[in-house]
Amino acid sequence: MSDSALVVEQNYEQLKNLALQKHGEIKEKPYVLVGTATCGRAAGALGVLDTFRNEIDNRQLDVNIIEVGCMGHCYAEPMVIIYKPGFPPLCYGSVDEGKAARLVTDFLIEDDPCFEFAMAALEPNDLFPTFGDYPRGVYEQKVILADCGLIDPENIDDYLACGGYGALAKALAMKPEEVIAEIKDAQLRGRGGAGFPTGIKWETCHDTPGPLKYVICNADEGDPGAFMDRALLESNPHQVLEGLVISACAVGASQGYLYVRAEYPLAITRLHTALEQARAKGLLGESILGSSFSFDIEIFKGSGAFVCGEETALIASIEGHAGIPTHRPPFPAVSGLRGKPTLIDNVKTLSYIPHIVQKGADWFKSIGTPNSPGTAVFALAGKVVGTGLVEVPMGTTLRTLIYDVGDGIKDGKTFKAVQIGGPSGGCLPESALDISIDFDSLREAGAMMGSGGIVVLNEDDCMVEVARFFLEFVQNESCGKCTFCRLGTKQMLDILTDITKGHGRPGDIELLLDLAEDIKTGSLCGLGKTAPNPVLTTINFFRHEYEAHINEGRCPALMCKDLITFHISAEKCSKLCDACVGSCPVEAVYTRPDMLKAIHLDKCVKCDNCLTTCRTLYDAVIKKSPPAAEEGVS
Amino acid sequence: MGLMEGELEIIRAEVEAVLEKYDLDREKLIPILQGVQVKLGYLPKEAMRQIAEALKVPEVDVYGVGTFYNQFRMNPPGKHQFKVCMGTACHMTGGRIIMESFERRLSISEGETTPDREFSLERVACVGCCALAPVVVVDETVEAKVRPTRVDGILLGFGLERAAPEKTAPDEGIDQGEEGREQ
Ligand SMILES: Cc1cc2nc3c(=O)[nH]c(=O)nc-3n(C[C@H](O)[C@H](O)[C@H](O)COP(=O)(O)O)c2cc1C
Ligand code: FES
């Protein structure tokens, strides 16, 4: 081993030992982890945190409270984990202030672990099942999410104590070519959407001569239904930073940027903290870990433009311009930011890097499929029970993902479709559920891996409306450079809007298909090239819904507002109940002389309130499509 | 929109303070605009002119960048902001209904501010809490699983008495009591 490699190793060992020592001290007494990522906060985690603080203070208990990120079980937020010597670490879901207070009195003071609201234990034991005993745990295989929700994102020692930055120390002792060879061999493919082989991109950037190079982490996460990158940044920021430093070291960059979307304020705060701590430990800045490699990272806050996730637009944005994509080639790896070779990788892609450097390409390839090795991280949302973040091996089927990992469809409803890949992706029906998830098979099915947002749709969701929604999104977000993208999407949106309003015309479907082809071929960047996908897949798999709208003025899912009316079924309505009357924001629901309720259709704003209110009582509120008259309601 | 008395001086001073923190380099345009918006809540024309002069770039460039990005506002926002998420998950779980509830209660449309500049209503495309859809961001706080009844609750928290369904007409005046607004 060379002298400098020895110095690096010694410096790293020193940091790690210090961290382990501190970690060991914490572990000696009980401690409570409260998940305070954005999802936890939305569900009330800060109130739970306060309760723990107050109760523990008031009782003068010697218990540490640590804020952590997200374990991925968003459906069960706020989540709390309690470590108490003598017990397995236990995880509690849907904790409110009352439960928090009981956990303090019953578990922390007494020895009753309140199993009635425990979710799972984190380690095998004789008392309580672990996550591995549930289907979600069986099918999940966590690599980059493994530490999320378990380590303190604002304390670098937690990351170091788990072996963090060990891969950086290892990479600093390797030749850049060796690091790149390992990534290439691992066949890691970019998780930002396109699935381009990461190693090849690194090699191109490395081989392009130049004294000044940049690396950029793309954390713009623009897909309006995806939150994997947010969760990773909020829960384990150092993992991304380590990946970014290794990439810089491999290609020879001296400056890095984290391009984070502005809608993620907590992620930005936690990243700032992480950067400061990494600098203080000598893991960033001049001669990292005592080596000859110097590198630093700056955060660039996005300003809310979906197209800025596209790499050339992102670069334009950092340079102070409107985010308008430019023609490739030259690829950024050859000529990017300020005309210099620039490597751009997604948050998830970079998060895999430390693991691959540490455990090797063969380990990585042992997971997933031959063409798409490794795991895939998905944000499960929509009408599925187990919403949240999941990480499964590539090649897992959509069925497993939705029914086993996600625990099926909410409220006993019927599955209709799964939207995968966001605005660039598509909607796949029941018949496509046995497709195994990887970059290539999804593309064949007309959808796209995209960034990993999955929204599950049920019988109540109108597929024409879904297509219209995405078209509206891309239409708003089109930068306007390419005529086909700018005007073509507008044209498509107008047609779709007409259809959802009941003004569709025969021939509209064919017109949409024609326009889709034109936009695909006539657009420069991925936004336009993929914009028609949601329309194409819904026409392909749910053409009958389009036809019902156009030919019968009927929305089969009873969703499109202009095509439905609300009524109260006299048979089901109870004379003794007037919950619906109170729930109406516009006084459209009234009591008839016979004490049954009815709805003034001219006043009704179709807000769903009476229907939701009545559903658990008499289920008497019904929707009709095509719209029906007020009289003659059964 | 006309400026109120004294506003121009405030704008000048705030922009000056932001400009001092950055190199006067075209590349810093977006961070500067972000900084100004944090201070003023929006980007007044006067501010953009001042920034253009300081960076020595045409005013139209500053305006072009300012209008390209969704985050930048060209008009002053309300004292309190309601951002209704219109991302995929929220849209499919009733985001539109939530938006309409706000519109009805505040008597303004999406993108507008109440005449007294108390409240503004905006849409956002996903705040990353899709698992808890539909979501509304009230000032800085994310509210999860919002139902129209919760909209009434949120407004009630700001002293807006409109939730009582029996009597109140949708367009009744705004109660501007100071009490509820603090939290
Ligand atoms: C319209 C559009 C939006 C994109 N949005 C994102 C995004 O939000 N995050 C991301 O990582 N990549 C996004 N990409 C892909 C990037 O251009 C680029 O391929 C990616 O950052 C490369 O990183 P990877 O190789 O790690 O995937 C987008 C591409 C297009 C065309
Ligand atoms: S879609 Fe609303 S938070 Fe993501």
Image: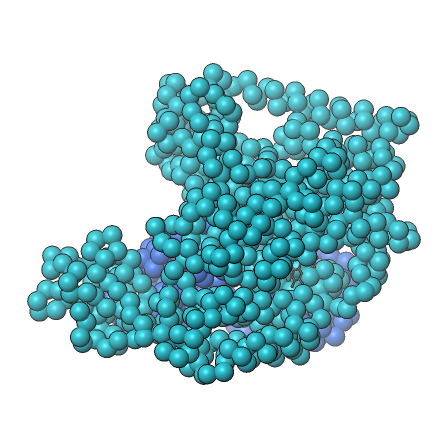
Chain colours: A cyan, B blue
Most extreme residue toward the left is A594
Task: State the residue in front, A468 or A214.
Answer: A468
Quadrant location, the C terminus of chain A: bottom left
Q: Quadrant of residue A503?
A: bottom left
Quadrant location, the N terminus of chain A: top right
Q: Quadrant of residue A54?
A: top left
* Position of residue A399 measured from the top left corner of the image (x, y, whole percent): 49, 48
Q: Is residue B15 left or right of residue B27?
A: left
Q: Quadrant of residue A458?
A: bottom left
Q: Is residue A212 left or right of residue A370?
A: right
Task: State the residue in front, A120 or B32.
Answer: A120
Residue name at image x 36 percent, y 23 percent: A106
Residue name at image x 36 percent, y 74 percent: A554
Q: How many marks?
A: 0
* Position of residue A186 measured from the top left corner of the image (x, y, whole percent): 75, 42
Q: Is residue A530 left or right of residue A43?
A: right
Residue name at image x 86 percent, y 29 percent: A5
Task: State the residue in front, A161 or A90.
Answer: A90
Q: Is residue A255 visible?
A: no
Q: Is residue A350 visible?
A: yes
Task: State the residue in front, A287 or A336.
Answer: A336
A624 relative to A2, above or below: below
A592 relative to A81, above or below: below
Most extreme residue toward the top is A86
* Position of residue A412 measured from the top left corner of the image (x, y, whole percent): 34, 50
* Position of residue B180 measured from the top left corner of the image (x, y, whole percent): 36, 53
Residue name at image x 74 percent, y 36 percent: A362
